[in-house]
Amino acid sequence: MNYENILVATHGKVGVITLNRPKALNALSDGLFDDVGLALDGFEADESIGCIVITGSDKAFAAGADISGMKDYGYMDAYKANFITKNWDRVARCRKPLIAAVAGFALGGGCELAMMCDMIFAADNAKFGQPEVKLGILPGAGGTQRLPRAMGKSKAMDMCLTARMIDAVEAERCGLVARIMPAETLLADTLVVAAGIAEYSLPVLMMIKESVNRAYESSLQEGLLFERRSFHAAFATNDRREGMTAFIEKRKPGFTNS
């Protein structure tokens, strides 16, 4: 499929989506998220894909939302169009492991897009921020909700109320970023990690993702119950039997995603 706003590729069992609006520093538009949603649909339907990476350019993962596309909106325009919810949230609904490989600016919606993914791998030149307050508006794609869960209330308030950007080192220290990598090898290094993930049992990967996400959406006891039921369910998979048998036989498991 030909996409207007993204590039799509596969590297073995890893699907890669590259945001591709270079003149706008990958500013996020409805058209871009329509493309991303279609690409995710394709990767999720492809049983050979075990992990997905979303990345941008060396200068910008995404420097924010496309302001020109929303500046004339009124309340009813945003409400009736179901703005953001109708297509941006597709990223957060992805069931397969999803890594954001972030270089350069990840600001506003760009930071929020990265947080919709399961992990953020940051280049050493990455900058994160929620500068919406400068435009007389607040974050609307998860900035006020996912940031506190990742970094704590005080840091989230600092970023959202002051519009201050933070670098990769501070982002990792606060828990927003999982790993920092050299900018020149960010994608290559991320693909190595993603390929390793994709070698595991896809049903179990999806169970792990659901269970970790449940920790943010329920009490500890409800989360533990969900984890336990998923753990029990894993005993019904062929991959669980193969993994444990391979361990006993001291060989590499051959998972079949079943």
Image (tube, rainbow, N blue to C red):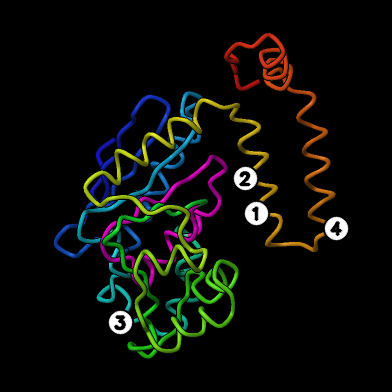
Q: Nearer the viewer, mark 4 or mark 3?
A: 4
Q: Residue at x 28, y 76 (%)?
A: 67
Q: Residue 244 carries which label?
A: none
Quick one: label 2, few (<14), some, or many (20+) residues within 10 Å? some
Residue, disc 3: 71
In the visual, does 139 lie left or right of 129?
A: right
For marks 4 and 1, the one nearer the N-term is: 1
The answer to the question of whether label 3 and label 1 lie on touching residues, with beta carbons closer than 8 A, is no
Query: What's the residue type where badge 3 is placed?
Result: Lys
Mark 3, Cα crowd under 10 Å, few <14 / some 14-19 / many 20+, is few
- Region in magenta: 89-117
User: Residue under circle 4?
Assistant: 221
**Residue type at tag 2:** Lys
Q: Give residue 209's mark.
A: 2
Q: How many labels does the image show?
A: 4
| Label 3, label 1: how far apart the Cα atoms are | 33 Å
Mark 4 and mark 1 in contact? Answer it, CB < 8 Å.
Answer: no
**Label 1 crowd bin: few (<14), some (14–19), many (20+), radius 10 Å:** few
